[in-house]
Image (tube, grey):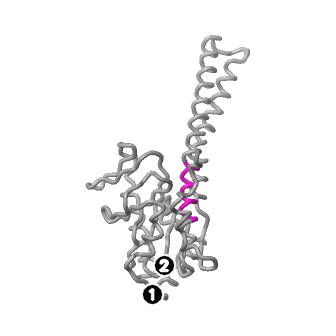
Amino acid sequence: MKNEIDLLPEIRENNSFMTEGKHAVIHGTPGDSARASGIVRALWPLLLALPICGVCAGLACPVRYRPPLTVAGALLIGAALLLTFFAYRGVQGINAWFKGARGEEQIAFLLAGLPGDWHVFHDFSLAQGVRADHVVVGPVGIFVIETKFWQGEVRLLENGQILVNGLKPSRPPLDQARRQGQLFSEWYARSNGQGVTAIPVLCFAGEAFSQQSQKRDGVQVCSASRLVPLLQGWSGHLSNETVERVVKLMEQKAGE
């Protein structure tokens, strides 16, 4: 069985753009925020359940003022079940967040093959509690990339609705990607006093999305295998001075 994070065969065979000595400049580490958030969000209920179990265990001990044995036993069993439930959910949550981090790493590998006049920022903070998986700055434009690593079949409908195995995702990914592009443009305008348009991109790692790259509601949607050709083929232009200015401001923000 093929490893779920293995790169697609067509990616490995057609990555001639990755020529030695001409790789993009990389800033940051992909997946760091996803792993840290996954551990915290998945395990805090478990930490809450531990003292509850301790209290219930204490009530079951033979002390002078203890509740009836049946009540204490029921509390202890309930606490044990609660602890087991939160432990199970915690492991599930960590696996989900770590899977997302692996998807970011797959996209990061591809972005590293961009030419040397491109800059790739991983896990870039856009606002309080909002981080972009990748922000790419190059001679043709600025791209804010939201990565999804979903199992099953992902379909983009004509009305802009995205379905995963025929179902709507809990969070609309197009809205998420578009919002991140807006946040970057707003941050740059505040920091530099000049406007810049960041192109939001929704990229699906793995093999879930097999359709051609297309635009929906202002967001570029593509699979991992089509991401780099989409960026390099973009019909935009940024001067060297603009690229340097954007990169400098981003480096300063990343260092805060």
Residue 185 falls inside the magenta stretch: no
Q: Which numbered dot is residue 138?
A: 2
- Asked whether the residues under the numbered discs 1 and 2 touch, taking CB atoms below 8 Å apart as contact, a structural biologist would say no
The picture quadrant where one finds residue 197 is bottom left
Q: Residue furthest left?
A: 159
On the rendered image, what quadrant is the N terminus found in? top right
- At label 1, the amino acid type is Ser
The percent coordinates of residue 239 (x first, y second) are 45, 87
Crowd rating for badge 2 (residues with CA inside 10 Å; few <14, some 14–19, many 20+): many
Distance (Cα) linking label 1 and label 2: 9 Å
In the image, is residue 195 above or below residue 64? below
Tell me, for residue 239, which label it has, or none.
Answer: 1
Residue for point 34% across, 63% down: 214
Is 48 located above or below residue 59 in the figure?
A: below
* Magenta-drawn segment: 97-109
Q: Please, what is the three-letter code of the amino acid marked with disc 2? A: Gly
